[in-house]
Amino acid sequence: MKKKTLDDNYYMRMAIRLARKGIGKTNPNPMVGTIIVKDGKIIGRGYHKKCGDYHAEINAINNVKGSIRGSTFYITLEPCSHYGRTPPCVDTLIKKKLERVVVGTPDPNPEVNGKGIKILRSKGIKVDVGILGSECRQLNEHYFKFIKSGIPYVTVKYAQTLDGRIATKTGDSQWISSEASRKYVHVLRSTNDGIMVGAGTVTADNPQLTVRHVKGKNPLRIIVDSKLRIPIKSSVLTDDNPHQTIIATTSNAPSRKITAIKKLGAEVLVVKKERNGKVSFSSLLKELGKREIMSVLVEGGSGMITALLKVNLVDKMIIPISPRILGKGLEAIGDLNINKIKDAIKFSSFKTMKKGDDLIFEGTILRNA
C-alpha cells in the first residue's frame, strides 16, 4: 500500500510539471496535465496547451502507441463531464476501458465539481482523489478563485528598500530592484491576464506595461483613472496595441476625453465610484470577471495598494526587497486603520527567493473564516 502511494505521488508530480507548460496560455481554462501508466511504464503524456484545444486527457491518449485498456490515468484536475468548448473527457475515458483514474483535485466549476468522478465510478472505474491535492490547487489558484467568486485573482507587486520605501522623498524609484528582479516581474506579467496601475504611474513614468525581458504574452493593460487625467500621448494609448488597454474611470470623466481615447482604440470602462469619487475596485473587478479575466497583477503605487488591501481584495503579495536603506521616502502601504497587532494582515503561506541582490517575498493572504 505504501509503495502505491509513493508511485501515485511520483506520477502526479510529473503531471503537475506537464500542466505548467500551459502557463499563460489556457485562460480562462485551468492548466491540466495527464500521465498514463500501464504495467509500471509511462505510455502517454499530455497537457492542455491552450483554450479551445484538446484537454490534457485527450492529448495524452493521442500520445499513446498501443492499447490503453487496463491503464491508470494521473490527472491534476477532475475530468470534465459537460460539453463546453470541447466534448466531455469522461466519455472518452470510459470508452478506453481504463482501470483507474487518480485525480489531484476536484474541479470547482459547478458544471463539473464531482460529477466527472461520480460518472467514472458508476462505470466501474476506480477513482482516487486528492493525491498532491494542495499542489494541484495551487497550480490553478487563479482559476479556483475566479470560478468560486467571479472576480480575478489579485496579486500585488512592488519593490521596496529594506526600510520599506518604494521611492525617495523626491519620488525617484528607478531602480530600487535588481535587474534579475525586474526580469522576474516580466515573468509574472506573462502569467497574468491583466496588469493594473493608476493614472499617477502612467503620468509620471509613461510605462509600456508589456512583456519584454522574457518570452510570453502581453497582459491586458488596466489603467485606473477616476477623472481620466492620463495624457492622450501615453504609450498605453499610442503604441501598436491600444486595443490591449482598458481605462477604468467614473462618471466624473469628461466626455470629450472618453471619445478621444476610444478613437485611439482603447476601451473606456465607466464603473461605480466610491464616496470619495474614486473608482470602486470591487465594481471594477466584477466587470473584469465578466470579461473572463481570471488574474490581475497590480503594479500600482501606494494609494492603489492601500485601497485594495483596505477592502480585502488582495490574494497574494510579491515584494522584491532591495538591501538598501533610504530613510525618509514614500511608504509602500498607507494607513489601513489597523490599531492592534492582532488585527494585522497575515499570510496563510509564504516563501522567499533570491533574485540578484534582492530577496523576494511571496505570500498568500490569510482569509478569515
Image: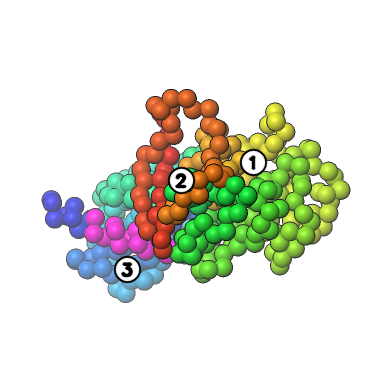
Name the residue: 70% across, 36% down.
278
Identify the amino acid type marked 2.
Asp
Is residue 339 placed above or below 139 in the rendered structure?
Answer: above
Q: Which is more N-terminal, label 3 or label 2?
A: 3
Front residue of 193 and 26: 193
Comparing labels 2 and 3, the label whose residue is closer to the camera: 2
Magenta-colored segment: predominant secondary structure: helix
Residue labelled with disc 3: 44
Look at the numbered discs 2 and 3 and tell me whether their residues touch, using CB distance below 8 Å.
no
Q: Is residue 13 magenta?
A: yes
Residue labelled with disc 2: 163
Identify the amino acid type marked 3.
Gly
User: What is the distance, in whole Å, between disc 1 and disc 2 at their CAs?
Assistant: 32 Å
Name the residue: 62% across, 59% down.
209
The C terminus - image quarter? top left
Specify the quadrant of the image occupied by residue 205: bottom right
Q: Residue furthest front?
A: 327
Identify the amino acid type marked 1.
Leu
- Decide if residue 15 is on the left or right side of residue 280: left
Name the residue: 65% across, 59% down.
207
Q: Is residue 70 magenta?
A: no
Instruction: Determine which of the numbered discs, if any, sits on residue 284 in the image.
Output: 1
Q: Which is more N-terminal, label 1 or label 3?
A: 3
